[in-house]
Image (cartoon, helix red, strand yellow):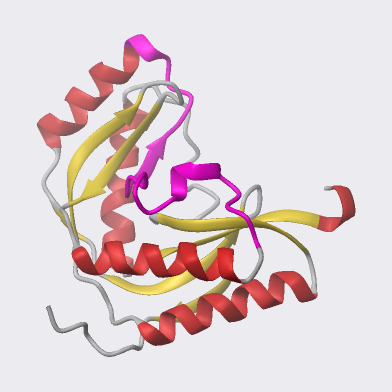
Amino acid sequence: MPGGAVTAVVCTAFDETTDEAVYAVREWLRHAGIPLPPRPPHRPHLTLAAARVRRGPELESLCTVAASIAARHAPVPLVLNEVGRFGRAGALWLGPAASPALRALQRTAYSALVQAGWPPAFGERSAPDQWVPHCTLATRVAKPLLRELQDLVRARFAPIPAPVEALAVILVGGRGDVRHVPLTGAADPQ
């Protein structure tokens, strides 16, 4: 990439049980003929915010910001109970029930990156008032097939407990976590 620039994503990290349950849903799609790798390059996650940064000290600074966010937020109990789609992107996804704690975590991540001087890498789609929390199962699915697959998953799907225990920093086009930091803040009294 020019000048070593990468898109760094601050996202949720679920526990291993949740990851395996999401992988099982992906397997349904593979068996339905969707060309997906057995394991995606990144863990199942909800993207909170992203920025274009240069590798090296700037990426390390973003990881430090992610760690400071994690230190201020407690783990978030979630349930993935919605099967949704984004028609333009041909994306099929799982979404969580409404969660004020998740909204607060996303708002903090978005604001922290902007305050650090990094404009949102994905434009206003990640702005807190437009953000749709989703865990992507597949992308680039042909539109005529998208609704059929959504119905297939809905018919077989049981809600998945999905506790958010940590934040991860991943790179678009990369593999695995650049950084993984547990959520260690106090629970927000609501």
Q: Position of residue 84 (x, y in %)?
A: 25, 34
Q: Name the residue nearer the viewer: 177 or 120.
A: 120
- Left or right, residue 141 beside residue 120: left
The residue at 56%/56% (across/down) is 50
Q: Position of residue 96 (x, y in %)?
A: 21, 52
Asked if residue 97 is among those painted magenta in the image, a careful observer would answer no
State the quadrant of the C terminus: bottom left
Magenta segment, prevailing SS (helix, strand or loop): loop
- The foreground one among 165 and 125 is 125
Residue 90 vs residue 4: left or right? left
Please report the bounds of the magenta region as a residue range. Answer: 118-144
Side of 96 relative to 117 (left or right): left
Can you tell which quarter of the image residue 77 is in?
bottom left
Question: In the picture shown, does residue 5 fall above or below 109?
Answer: above
x, y percentage for residue 71?
42, 87
Left or right: 46, with 18 as reference point: right
